[in-house]
Image (cartoon, rainbow, N blue to C red):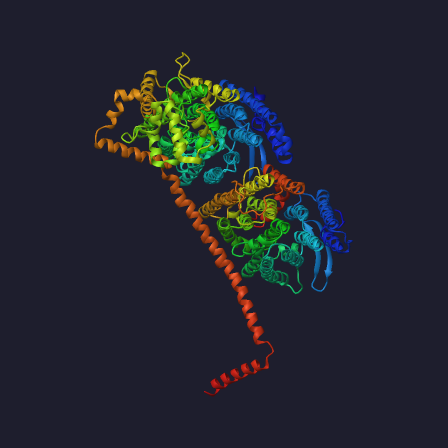
């Protein structure tokens, strides 16, 4: 309807504006912070405006399309477009990045580069979620890695280089398979590469080839999402990184894997997905239990939260694997919900850790008296994370449960078993979260703490926490608010699987 | 008429504005909000009273018109699946509404005084009002998902309130235990809900019953699956109502403030499990296997609870075990299908137990200045005794509550318990025997609590004794006073005999012995011989007690069979008519008065026997029995005495160690989970991460090797060249 290139602007604005940071006058960090903050806000507002006025929710087709030739030799186009699936993720990206920038207020070392990298990441993420070209998707996927690697390796704890290297090796390893898949799909059946997602949807492949492609993509996503056994980069990374980076990682980066799984594997390779989905569900259920019980054994509370995040990803995998309308909606809801909750838990852990300078649970205790606000928010978000009703996590998990049991794909017994295993995860989650709370906050001893004068959260942190808390409650009480974004698109997507 | 129903949705939402404003106030502007303190308590009481007026109005309409009203809004709309939110007003709901609001108001008023010196006064009010909201939501909910929703919220409130004094490590672990145990129940509940959704395709109660009743007799669906799902649903109720395998959280939950124990862990939240089973009884009743399982669990629980309550030292813990036992009675009643009796007992027990808990709260309140604020001391019955003189009003209330719970005729619990007992005799003699025996036990342990607390002489000085002397003697002395006869009597008895003059001497002796361990209080006692006596709490705390006393006295009347010409309909049965008609059970309730009296006589005699034994063991009028030589005749008799002693010791240690169930759970589940955790962590660190790091290390080594080899040394190139050439030649030539 409007020919104004909204998406291009949204993708390009942060990185361009970010590169201007280096030309700002050297007058302290303040100016850089405010500049970045205003760019993030501007971007977020633009995004909201564009989606409010130029996007129809009822329409399950791709909207705000843009298509211009970029590299003619191999038919590479700059194709952008969004639909109900990507809308939620893009809004989440805008929201979380803005808040992560706010969270990064205390970063003073090399702050220009830090903020530039955050903005570059912003571009990469929005580009990923809105690209409609397979190669563009891949490029954005890779573009994303560079700022993340730098953020991980330059700011954070003592072992940050180790974890950054681990991260980059894992993701680069996954990307090889991704690239092979992209090229294979693009070159199959014709001499000139066809990378347009629209056209690829109707493409059909021989069964083996499709499974091979599927598997290749799956490895790339399994690293990002993460799916066991490719998850070990995540706890290391989250344990070491600065908490605003953690927020971005947990809030958005992990969701790229889930998005890719839906966007490419489900949409383009339906037959293989149909074959693979039982395995996905089984892996998801195993992951819930495995990560939850590993989390319980962690002494470092950041790592404990990181494993809890891995455990919650299991629900997304199950939702995607259930191949039902409800299940997929649940998975999308869980993407958003974990984006809020997981990111905030990392933020809280990071801020608490910065104050106490301790990360091992057995050294902590009795912190609730000096820091009641952090205690309150930590408890609230732990409750949200263990799927307390009235918060978004509950709705997402419940919807995934319903999706699984209504799935016509599976037989009764396996369905019952999987549901049972998932529900055991429901018991394990409060054990590790509440015992973490107990060890950190309850009690009265303050034995190992170097200085006893902690400051409670200031207004900036409170603002940030409340900003995230409101949508969590909002989704929990009225989930249609978010479900309505994706319902029609999901239905259209699933009609491929069960033609009427 | 109809418009009251239409606005019934406000009942659960009424307390919400206060909670929100208090919560945000506390979070954002703590000092300003804290300065207002009592101003906040008033609106929360007021709003709850409005809710009470509403619910009373609804119940009157239910009694007169008895129509069921349901209203639904859609919550999430999806094409294949929609969740609805709504409310359902039926007799069961209206009973629960009245119960929750009345007890809730009284507890709020009570806690205004009880918590007035606490740091977290407002936080307490936020939690408790939130609890009220979610509990009201739970009972008005119209489908299973909504039940689950509020079920969890109620559990969370319980978690927060048990851990209210979060600086106490015991409270911290108690609240975690409560939450996790309840989560086990929620796990079952959720799976059961999902299973029934899968079977029937609906979550609405009425659709569920309709479908279940049409299908189950025709065996159209997998009956095994139905039974499994019903069992899982029951698991939820087991955890929430502290039934046998999952009861472990309830006694620990007493770490919370006493008003909470009265409201949540005696009157309302623990009744949620009973409520759930009552709500789903039309579903369960078509599954006889599950019904008998429910009654079995109920019987086990009521017996276990009673035995565990026998030798508790902590006043609140004994009451908690008694709650567990009474909940077992309700569960038994539901299991044998006597819906009305179960609900009747639910109501009467709620008021009596709330009275008892609030009474114990005021006992604790009065003991705290004397013995210190640790729950080990202020709730320890060993240190109480003789409080009858100092706090007479509380004592009266407590006594009536005790008698009511024991089942003494004109009081509330008599009517309901008698109904359950007679129904259980009708159902099966086995359950009947256990239930009746436990009624005797109930009388025994309840009266024991009463006697230890209010009778005899104040034993405050005992705390020093208990900390210095070895534990076994101390504990045995609590179990029965007349054990260590030969030695030197008991400490208690000696004081009791010689009176107050001996009292201070003794104390000063201990004072010398223990040195600094005695607090300032006993020092002053030893030297100046002045005594700080426990005081009756303020009027704000007595008022709820008295109201509850009235309730306890008269609430039984709603279930009494009046011999009118209209028929033998009680108010309660009139109230519950639609639900009872639903499963044609009303024929059961037409017992004639002769049968009623015979039943009543047997149960009352049992109760009185229990009271008598308790009085014999713990009564203060020691000399009276000694003169009669009654105890001596009991005890004397060579081997018989030894056997008696051993038995008593066994029972004591069983009860004191909570039936070894907690230890068993710790040994199996906790350690099992820890083992699993260690295993997975080892696997994660060693195998999965090990492979990654191994690959990294290997590539590093290979790189180093290659670097070394390709390091540009001509000599090494030559060496390798010659080596290969020689190998080649060797093979080629040979």
* Above or below: residue B626 compared with residue B217: above
Q: Which residue is located at x 56 percent, y 76 percent? A: B709
- Left or right of A377? Residue B366 is left
Q: Looking at the rendering, in which quadrant would you find the C terminus of chain B?
A: bottom left
Q: Position of residue B391 (x, y in %)?
A: 45, 21
* Above or below: residue A485 compared with residue B613: below
Q: B47 or B593, which lies in front?
A: B47
Q: A437 or B581, which lies in front?
A: A437
Residue with the most extreme top position: B565
Q: Looking at the rendering, in which quadrant would you find the N terminus of chain B?
A: top right
Q: How many marks?
A: 0
Q: B430 or B439, which lies in front?
A: B439
- Left or right of A214? Residue B199 is left
Q: Position of residue A335 (x, y in %)?
A: 59, 47
- Left or right of B395? Residue A330 is right
Residue with the most extreme bottom position: B733
- Left or right of A88? Residue A418 is left
* Above or below: residue B230 compared with residue A232: above
Q: Residue B634 is drawn in which quadrant?
A: top left
* Above or below: residue A500 compared with residue A74: above
| Residue B84 shows in this picture | yes
Q: Position of residue A228 (x, y in %)?
A: 52, 54
């Amino acid at each position: 309807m409007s020919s104004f290139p909204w998406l291009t602007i949204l993708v390009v604005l942060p990185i361009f504006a970010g590169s201007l940071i280096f030309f700002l006058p050297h007058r302290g960090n303040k100016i850089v912070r405010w500049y970045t903050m205003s760019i993030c806000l501007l971007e977020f507002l633009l995004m909201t405006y564009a989606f409010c006025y130029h996007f129809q929710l009822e329409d399950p087709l791709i909207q705000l399309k843009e298509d211009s030739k970029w590299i003619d030799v191999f038919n590479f186009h700059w194709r952008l477009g969004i639909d109900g699936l990507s809308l939620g993720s893009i809004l989440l990206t805008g929201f979380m990045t803005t808040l992560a920038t706010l969270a990064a207020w205390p970063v003073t070392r090399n702050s220009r580069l830090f903020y530039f990298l955050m903005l570059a990441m912003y571009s990469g993420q929005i580009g990923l979620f809105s690209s409609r070209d397979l190669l563009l998707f891949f490029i954005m996927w890779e573009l994303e890695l560079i700022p993340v690697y730098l953020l991980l390796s330059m700011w954070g704890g003592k072992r940050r280089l180790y974890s950054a290297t681990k991260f980059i090796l894992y993701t680069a390893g996954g990307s090889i398979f991704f690239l092979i898949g992209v090229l294979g799909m693009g070159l199959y059946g014709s001499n000139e590469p066809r990378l347009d997602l629209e056209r690829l949807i109707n493409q059909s492949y021989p069964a083996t080839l499709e499974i091979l492609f599927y598997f290749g993509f799956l490895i790339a996503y399994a690293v990002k999402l993460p799916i066991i056994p490719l998850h070990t980069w995540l706890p290391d990374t989250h344990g070491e990184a600065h908490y605003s980076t953690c927020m971005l990682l947990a809030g958005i980066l992990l969701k790229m894997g889930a998005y890719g799984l839906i966007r490419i594997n489900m949409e383009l390779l339906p037959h293989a997905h149909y074959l693979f989905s039982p395995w996905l569900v089984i892996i998801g259920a195993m992951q819930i239990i495995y990560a939850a019980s590993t989390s319980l054994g962690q002494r470092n509370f950041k790592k404990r939260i990181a494993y809890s995040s891995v455990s919650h990803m299991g629900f997304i995998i199950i939702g995607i694997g259930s191949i039902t309308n409800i299940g997929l909606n649940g998975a999308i809801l869980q993407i958003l919900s974990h984006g809020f909750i997981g990111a905030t838990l990392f933020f809280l852990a990071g801020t608490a850790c910065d104050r106490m300078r301790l990360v091992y649970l057995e050294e902590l205790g009795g912190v609730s008296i000096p820091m009641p606000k952090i205690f309150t928010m930590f408890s609230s978000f732990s409750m949200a994370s263990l799927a307390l009703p009235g918060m978004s996590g509950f709705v997402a998990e419940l919807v995934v449960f319903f999706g699984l049991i209504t799935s016509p794909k599976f037989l009764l017994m396996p369905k019952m078993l999987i549901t049972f295993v998932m529900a055991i995860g429901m018991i394990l989650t409060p054990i590790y979260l509440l015992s973490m709370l107990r060890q950190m906050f309850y009690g009265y001893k303050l034995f190992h703490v170097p200085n006893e004068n902690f400051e409670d959260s200031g207004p900036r942190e409170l603002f940030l926490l409340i900003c995230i808390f409101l949508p969590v409650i909002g989704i929990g009480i009225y989930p249609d608010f978010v479900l309505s974004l994706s319902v029609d698109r999901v239905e259209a997507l699933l009609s491929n699987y069960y033609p009427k | 008429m109809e418009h009251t129903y239409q606005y019934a949705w406000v009942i659960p939402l009424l307390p919400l504005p206060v909670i929100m404003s208090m919560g945000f106030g506390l979070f954002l502007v703590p000092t300003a909000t804290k300065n207002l303190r009592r101003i906040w308590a008033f609106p929360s009481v007021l709003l709850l009273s409005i809710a009470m007026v509403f619910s009373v109005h609804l119940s009157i309409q239910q009694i007169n018109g008895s129509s069921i009203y349901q209203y639904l809004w859609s919550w999430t709309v999806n094409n294949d699946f929609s969740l609805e939110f709504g409310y359902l007003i039926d007799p069961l709901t209206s009973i629960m509404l009245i119960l929750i609001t009345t007890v809730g108001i009284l507890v709020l008023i009570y806690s205004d005084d009880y918590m007035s010196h606490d740091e977290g006064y407002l936080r307490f009010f936020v939690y408790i009002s939130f609890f009220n909201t979610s509990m009201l939501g739970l009972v008005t909910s119209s489908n299973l998902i909504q039940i689950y929703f509020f079920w969890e919220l109620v559990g969370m409130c319980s978690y927060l309130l048990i851990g209210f004094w979060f600086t106490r490590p015991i409270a911290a672990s108690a609240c975690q235990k409560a939450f996790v145990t309840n989560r086990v129940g929620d796990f079952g509940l959720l799976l059961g809900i999902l299973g029934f959704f899968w079977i029937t395709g609906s979550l609405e109660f009425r659709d569920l019953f309709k479908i279940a009743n049409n299908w189950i007799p025709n065996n159209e669906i997998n009956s095994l699956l139905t039974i499994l799902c019903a069992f899982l649903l029951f698991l939820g109720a087991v955890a929430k109502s502290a039934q046998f395998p999952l009861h472990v959280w309830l006694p620990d939950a007493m770490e919370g403030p006493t008003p909470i124990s009265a409201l949540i862990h005696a009157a309302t939240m623990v009744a949620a499990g009973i409520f759930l089973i009552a709500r789903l009884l039309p579903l369960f009743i078509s599954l006889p296997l599950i019904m008998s399982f429910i009654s079995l669990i109920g019987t086990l629980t009521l017996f276990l609870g009673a035995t565990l309550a026998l030798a508790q030292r902590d006043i609140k813990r004994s009451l908690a075990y008694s709650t567990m036992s009474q909940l077992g009675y309700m569960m038994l009643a539901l299991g044998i299908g006597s819906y009305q009796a179960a609900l009747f007992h639910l109501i009467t027990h709620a008021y009596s137990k709330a009275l008892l808990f609030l009474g114990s709260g005021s006992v604790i309140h009065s003991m705290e200045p004397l013995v210190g604020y640790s729950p080990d001391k202020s709730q320890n019955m060993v240190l109480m005794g003789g409080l009858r003189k100092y706090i007479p009003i509380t004592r009266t209330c407590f006594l009536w509550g005790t008698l009511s719970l024991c089942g003494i005729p004109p009081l509330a619990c008599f009517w309901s318990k008698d109904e359950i007992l007679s129904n259980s005799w009708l159902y099966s003699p086995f359950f009947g025997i256990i239930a009746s025996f436990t009624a005797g036990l109930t009388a025994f342990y309840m009266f024991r609590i009463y006697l230890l607390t209010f009778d005899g002489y104040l034993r405050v000085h005992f705390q020093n004794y208990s900390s210095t002397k070895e534990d076994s003697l101390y504990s045995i002395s609590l179990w029965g006073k007349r054990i260590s006869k030969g030695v030197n009597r008991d400490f208690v008895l000696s004081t009791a005999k010689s009176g107050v003059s001996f009292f201070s001497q003794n104390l000063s002796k201990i004072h010398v012995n223990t040195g600094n361990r005695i607090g300032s209080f006993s020092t002053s006692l030893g030297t100046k011989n002045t005594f700080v006596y426990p005081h009756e709490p303020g009027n704000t705390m007595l008022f709820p007690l008295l109201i509850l006393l009235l309730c306890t006295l008269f609430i039984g009347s709603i279930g009494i069979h009046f011999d009118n010409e209209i028929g033998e309909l009680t108010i309660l049965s009139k109230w519950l008519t639609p639900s009872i008609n639903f499963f044609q059970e009303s024929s059961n309730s037409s017992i004639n008065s002769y049968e009623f009296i015979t039943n009543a006589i047997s149960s009352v005699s049992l109760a009185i026997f229990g009271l008598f034994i308790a009085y014999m063991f713990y009564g203060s009028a020691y000399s009276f029995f000694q003169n009669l030589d009654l105890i001596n005749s009991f005890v004397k008799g060579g081997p018989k005495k030894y056997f008696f002693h051993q038995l008593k010791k066994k029972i004591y240690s069983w009860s004191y160690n909570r039936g070894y169930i907690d230890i068993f759970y710790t040994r199996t589940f906790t350690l099992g989970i820890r083992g699993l955790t260690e295993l997975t962590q080892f696997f994660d660190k060693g195998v999965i991460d090990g492979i990654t790091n191994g690959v990294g290390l290997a590539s590093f080594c290979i790189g180093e090797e290659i670097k070394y080899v390709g390091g540009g040394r001509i000599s090494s190139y030559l060496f390798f060249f010659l080596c290969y050439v020689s190998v080649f030649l060797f093979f080629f030539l040979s």
